[in-house]
Amino acid sequence: TKTRYTELPLNVRTGGASSSKTGGDVDWFLFELPERGIINLSFEHNDEQLPQVGWLVTVLNETGDILYDGRSYYNNKQITSGEIGLDAGVYYVRVTSHILSTVDYYLTCDYEPIDTYETEMNDTPETADVLPLNGEESGVSGSLSDKNTRPDRDYYCFAPERNGVISFSFIHQDYTRNRDGWTIRLLNESGEVLYETVSRWCDMAVTSPQIGLSAGTYYLVVDGEDMLLNSGTYVLGITYAAGDNWESEPNNSSEQADTIVRNETGYGTLISTGLSYDTDWFTFELTQTSSVRLLFTHEAQSEAYEGWVIDLYDEAGNQITDLRSLWSDAEKQSEILRLAPGKYTVRVDTGARFTDIRYGLQVRY
């Protein structure tokens, strides 16, 4: 039982043996980490030349949460957990025999102290690891653990104190296979998906576009649900710069529109939310009849795809103008519009071909 266990020294190969018990044998081991770090658990035995599951090898914390759940076949001489980030504390390894057997096995819990790796359990917003924002790129390493009961998710929390813009990178080694391995999502505090991307096994680096956010609490979530599990180590990096000249996601409706300052450039990007692309809304108010012109800019690309549709609406929702910008247009401007006093909104939407290039928008009057 869990109260009768064998000490599992760190970085030492330790032997164990299944016993012939009706219903299978369960062996418990305990190890303790003196400080935060990573472990890599290996389970070894002789090749018994039988293609059948012989043991379940499970790592648990003191409250019984499953941190790793592996299966060892009789004809598979060794399985490894991959790197698992853990806080200092007491943990358990449970070895469960599937069928009657007296085969000897060996456990090794390799341990390395490190404070820049995720710490399990970080599967929920409440248990998220903190990503510091220090003006430069900061980051953390992590990995998705094999858990037969449910997929592993890694939550990371960051909280900009001012409006600004972020971008993040997701890096891992090239595993050559063209298979989806990780989904990375950006969520706000209410759980709304602001951005989503996928990294394949053969992608060594995936980088998000620049994303404007208001002050608040946000989460980056890494999971491999409905994908071929890859337990390799990844590095998640984030860059943040404070500033009031960026859109703040989500601004996907006229009710969520960001205020744009007269004759000043407001920046934004159209970003992917997984199943669709977002729209960006901006608002301004005229106190008197004015001559207004919209100016839309971005870095020119070689292709001439239609990338953006920029629409201007009055307070009643009537469309006033429809401006379209190609990828190859460095600058696009509307005709001069004579507008009455009142509130107006500008919607920036995806054209015929999506792009997440940063754009600039000015309302000149």
Image: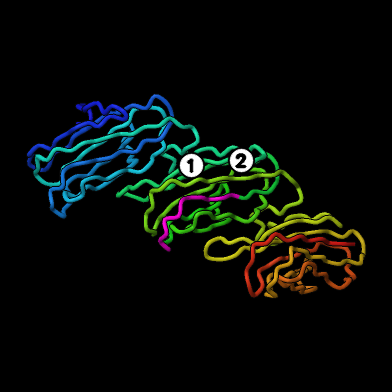
Main secondary structure of the magenta stretch: loop
- Seen at 76% across and 74% down, the residue is 322
Q: Is residue 97 left or right of residue 327?
A: left
Q: Which mark is residue 229?
A: none
Residue 3 in percent (x, y) is at: 22, 27
Relative to 212, residue 118 above or below: above
- Seen at 68% across and 73% down, the residue is 303
Say how the picture is coloured.
Answer: rainbow
Q: Which residues lie in the magenta part?
A: 168-178
Callout 2: few (<14), some (14-19), or many (20+) C-alpha neighbours within 10 Å?
some
Q: Which mark is residue 159?
A: 2
Residue 208 in percent (x, y) is at: 59, 55
Question: In the structure shown, which secondary structural element does the residue marked by tag 1 occupy?
Answer: strand
Q: Is residue 31 left or right of residue 225?
A: left
Question: In the structure shown, which secondary structural element does the residue marked by tag 2 occupy?
Answer: loop
- The alpha-carbon separation of the residues under discs 1 and 2 comes to 19 Å
Quick one: label 1 or label 2, which is nearer the N terminus?
A: 1
- Seen at 11% across and 46% down, the residue is 99
Q: Nearer the viewer, residue 78 or 183?
A: 78
- What residue sits right under mark 1 in the picture? 141
Residue 316 in percent (x, y) is at: 77, 68
